[in-house]
Image (cartoon, helix red, strand yellow):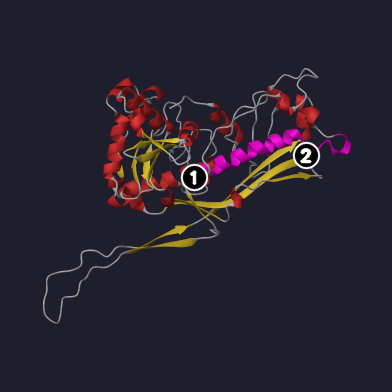
Amino acid sequence: MKTKSIFKLSILAAAFLCAPLLTLASVALALVTPSGVALDVLNPASITWNGKEVMAMNEAIFEDVFINPEMSALHTIVPNIVAKQQIAYLGLLTMVGRSGSGCSPTSDTATATLTEKFWNPSPVTFRLEECYTTYNASFFVWSQNKGIKRSELTNTDVFNFIQERAATALSEAQLRIAWFGDTDATNYNGSPAGLITNGVNTNLVDAIDGFFKQIYAIVAADASKKAASITKNAGGTYALQAFDSTDTTNKVATGYFRSVLTGADLRLRGKAEKMFIVTQSVYDQYLEELEQFGAIESAFKLQTDGTNQLTYRGIPVVPFAFLDRMIDTIQDNGTKWYQPHRIILTTKQNLQVGVESEEALKELDPHYDKVTKKNYIDAEWLMDAKVIQNYMIEVAY
């Protein structure tokens, strides 16, 4: 698990933006508060202004963005979810058939259980607000229009940059809500005490109950869905939560994979498309163990696209570093992280994200208001997340 990163600063100062920052200018995207107050997206005051120096955006150094999987890579997207909608489950009919003879066989009493869940999508919005005067004492001034159009930024290099960063922020917001959503979210120092880092706005995660909230409920109802407790998660400090050489010698990650697989429902074990979704910390530890014991080459499987996929017993092991970054950012009590190492065995079909339309997940609305002379980027979408079949999941954390 990496030490606390720039993403904590990004969340605290910038609401929906978890994307990396421009090296020469700290980028701060801000969620408009209910009172309508918003912070400037870019903060030129964080760099030195000495007149005519850097004169264009392409002369600045852009920090690389983190590569996240597309929403559709690990999840099944279900469109046309616009209001509460039933998901009906038709259970199995088992334990029928008995010895008998004659013309009047005994009727079986077995029944197929019917259950249900509900899609309950919630609206999520963000607004980025920017005023041109922010740039009057910075190199960004060279990107401004002239005259009466000086206040309009929507066709300038600086606003194009903001839109690019906003697109990354948009996708990260959706992943964050899908996985860490909790309608009852509170901070560590809240009442009742919660899991969200002190100072982080709980509105960032309280739109829906995401995958982890549902997984915890599934495990609470059926303890067999949690195959193992990852010992390092119980460490009382960041250092004590880190895997070490002893863990490598003992092949702890390999052991956790074994427990999760053998503990899974036979229907999940029989699925050809099952996969382990893991934090980067678990992935790295598994690699350490494979390297130490000379088994790394046999653990990789050549894919049809020519790439190699790390596997455990032929099952893909998919590193989802986004989980590590969010745990680092929004589930840190100042001494340790909440469950920094996590393993989920499931299928893409079992992790569903309900949306009104896939297009809405990527749509940004940049616009300029002549009355206020301010520039805006808006986004709004409906979404929900569902673990579809409880038995099609097995975890360790």
Quarter of the image containing the C terminus?
Answer: top left
Mark nearer the N terminus (2 vs 1): 1
Element class at badge 1: helix
Q: Name the mark on residue 155.
A: 2
In-image side of 288 versus 53 (left or right): left
Task: State the residue in front, 203 or 139.
Answer: 139
Count of marks placed on residues = 2
Element class at badge 2: loop
Distance from the alpha carbon under mark 2 to that under mark 1? 33 Å
Magenta segment boundaries in residue numbering: 146-175
From the viewer's perspective, is residue 297 above or below residue 227? above
From the viewer's perspective, is residue 187 above or below residue 77? above
Q: Name the mark on residue 177.
A: none
Q: Residue at x 53, y 33 (%)?
A: 199
Nearest to the eye among marks 2 and 1: give it: 1
Quarter of the image containing the N terminus?
Answer: top left
**Which residue in the protein does label 1 denote?**
73
User: Hey, what amino acid is under mark 1?
Assistant: Ala
Kindly indicate whether the residue at mark 1 contacts the one at mark 2 (C-beta within 8 angstroms).
no
Q: Percent from the top left, x then y, of residue 134?
A: 75, 30
Q: Percent from the top left, x then y, of residue 370?
A: 82, 44
Local packing at callout 1 (Cα closer than 10 Å; few below 14, some 14-19, many 20+) is few
Q: Is residue 163 magenta?
A: yes
| Camera sees residue 229 | no
Q: Residue at x 28, y 50 (%)?
A: 266
User: Hey, what amino acid is under mark 2?
Assistant: Asn
From the viewer's perspective, is residue 389 above or below residue 142? below
In-image side of 158 versus 396 (left or right): right
